[in-house]
Amino acid sequence: MRVSSGMIFDAGVSSINRQTASLLHLQQQVSSGRRILSPSDDPVAAARALEVTQSSEVVAQFIKNQDYASLALGLEEAQLTSVGEVLGEVRQLAVQAGSTNLPATARSGIAVTLRARFNELLGLANASDGTGQHMFAGFMGAVEPFGGSVDNILAGNEIVYQGDDGQRTMQVSPSRFVEVSDSGNDVFKRIRSGNGYFSTDYAAGNSGTGIVTSGSVTNPATWSAATTKDVSINFTVTAGVTTYDLIDTSSGISLLTGAAGPAPLANQRAYQSGQPIVLKSQGAEAAFDLGASTSVSGAPASGDSFSTTPSASQSIFVTLANLIGALEAPTGTSAADAKYINDIGFALTNLDQGINNVLRVRAGIGSRMNEIESLASLNENLSLQYQQNLSDLQDLDYAKAISDLTRKQVDLEAAQQSFSRISQLSLFNYL
């Protein structure tokens, strides 16, 4: 085979270029700390590194979502804490007002304070989260959810809610969406009245001094199974003896006899102030049992009546407005004073229901925040694991790389020196 001088020069330059390129590649690996500078360096590891990187970025986004969800829930919890403080102050004022000996000026002062608390409560219900979204408007965050006033409610108009029942959610893991808001209906309006099972009330025409309690359910299973729950407690005073009858208000049937119309005096029950009025048949009376009882204290007049009706939803704003209305109503007669004490009692019972409902919502927020904390810990571990996997796939083994770099330097120097020697071989050197 004939080897020309041109072939020798081309081969020498090509070898030096390959050695230089290899040395440059090693130098770039050392300077970057990465073993894979392009997918061709290790196609399998490069593909796996891309998958791990994408998974790591998804986890990083979930961590951001968790931070946002925690912030949103923290803001809502702070608002509800303020709501609870307002309702606690209102309850204290209601207890303070629960005396017929309170001067009219003191009642008026409490009513003015309660009007201010009403407006404060309305402002908290319309609070925004700092991004222009109202916390308690459901999905309709751009709309101020509540509108109205004490006077509107006292005139017979309910507080206006312009939001919806939606709960905004945030995805905080591949399979978990966490609610980061609660609707105003659920927090402020959808509150069970009375004791949660039934509400008590007095007839507008009562002329005695009877005061009814909120009552209680002694057997929830019986109460749930009962078909008749609207009961009117009608009092009769004859020759100084007070008795009462229990009437099914939907049919007018006496629950003590099972017949239409009032029960005869012989079938009515004797009244004792403060003693339980059990909504249940006794002795030979018509069989019925609502699993509940209430009590009336004072001296009801003949014809006075009190009612028990199943609890319905009542907004905390209506409860507060009714309390203000009771404080602003005229008193001075025994009957008016009795109605006033009844109204204060109803307000206290409904305020307790409202406070308990706020605590229930706050408990739900707390459980969601705890869940987010648990997921955050899991995601931090996942993120650390992904970083470890990427390090195993991409990071450079410096001991091996520096050894290879030194060897490549020797190889390049040898190629350069050998080429220098070979390039000087020529017959013209001997002429």
Image: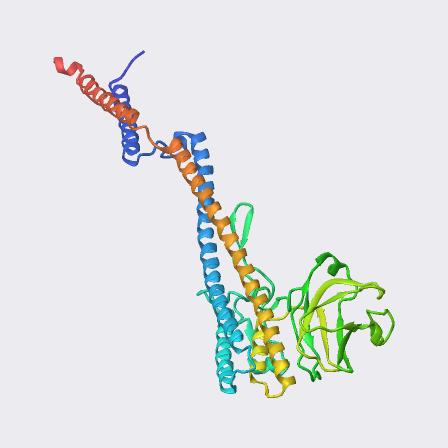
Tell me: 380 left or right of 277: left
Kindly give the residue lying farthest to the top in the view shown.
Answer: 1
Residue 160 in sight here = no
Task: Give me the residue at 69% from left, 62% from top.
Answer: 217
User: Which image quadrant is residue 131 in?
Assistant: bottom left
Kindly give the residue lying farthest to the right in the view shown.
Answer: 259
Q: Classify 19 as above or below 394.
A: above
**The C terminus appears in which quarter of the rendering?**
top left
**The N terminus appears in which quarter of the rendering?**
top left
Residue 420 is situated, as x and y percent measured from the top left of the image, at: 18, 20
Tell me: 350 left or right of 296: left
Q: Nearer the viewer, residue 150 or 57?
A: 150
Residue 53 is situated, as x and y percent measured from the top left of the image, at: 43, 40
Tell me: 64 left or right of 31: right
User: Which image quadrant is residue 304 in?
Assistant: bottom right
Task: Give me the residue at 70% from left, 80% from top.
Answer: 300
Q: Classify 399 as above or below 233.
A: above
Residue 98 is situated, as x and y percent measured from the top left of the image, at: 55, 77
Residue 377 in sight here = yes
- Total marks shown come to 0
User: Which image quadrant is residue 361 in?
Assistant: bottom right
